[in-house]
Image (spheres, rainbow, N blue to C red):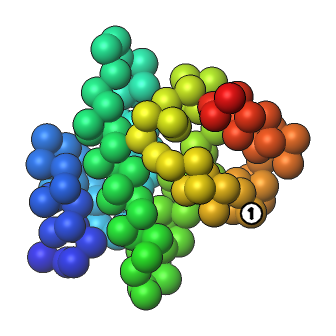
Amino acid sequence: MSRWRREASERLPELQRIIASKDVDKPMMLWIDLNIEFERLCEIDPLPIDLLKRIWGYCEWCLAQGTSDIQTAAALAFCEHLIDTPKRTAIFPKIMRRSDFIDLRELLEYHNAPEKVKKALTTAWR
């Protein structure tokens, strides 16, 4: 089993149906599916904060890896979409540090207008 898949399985056992899917053959496909799941989880009331935090933790792990396909997948298929909806933006203070978001600012501005990124930052951490 690949290191990225094993790490996802250990951190996110309740998402095994996604992680172990035969359609998930590369980190990019996993992050595309995790991003979709993250969006769905943001709609649940009450929010599954623990699971959302662990998805973010797995993203941090991926971003810290020396393997570019793992880093690229987390960055492009997940991080660039962090501010796609107001519900996602609203949960940031519950799952990540403000400094984490600031560290992603350049990446976020590649996919989003700088004004949108600034608004997300000021809205989430008032």
| Left or right, 40 with reference to 5 | right
Name the residue located 19 percent from the left edge and 50 percent from the top edge: 12
In the image, residue 44 sits, relative to residue 41, either above or below, namely above
Q: Looking at the image, can residue 85 be seen? A: no
Mark 1 Cα-neighbour bin, 10 Å: few <14, some 14–19, many ≥20: some
Q: Position of residue 49 (x, y in %)?
A: 32, 31
In the image, residue 120 sits, relative to residue 40, either above or below, namely below
In the image, residue 109 sits, relative to residue 5, either above or below, namely above
- Element assignment for label 1: helix
| Left or right, 3 with reference to 87 | left
Between 74 and 101, the one lying in front of the other is 101
Q: Which residue lies furthest to the top in this view?
A: 45
Q: Locate residue 90: give its quadrant.
A: top right
Query: Which quarter shows the N terminus?
Result: bottom left
- Residue corresponding to mark 1: 106
Name the residue located 69 percent from the left edge and 62 percent from the top edge: 107
Q: Looking at the image, can residue 82 be seen? A: yes
Q: Position of residue 123 (x, y in %)?
A: 70, 28
Name the residue located 29 percent from the left edge and 48 percent from the top edge: 54
Q: Locate residue 64: give its quadrant.
A: bottom left
Q: Position of residue 5 (x, y in %)?
A: 22, 67
Q: What residue type is labelled 1?
A: Glu
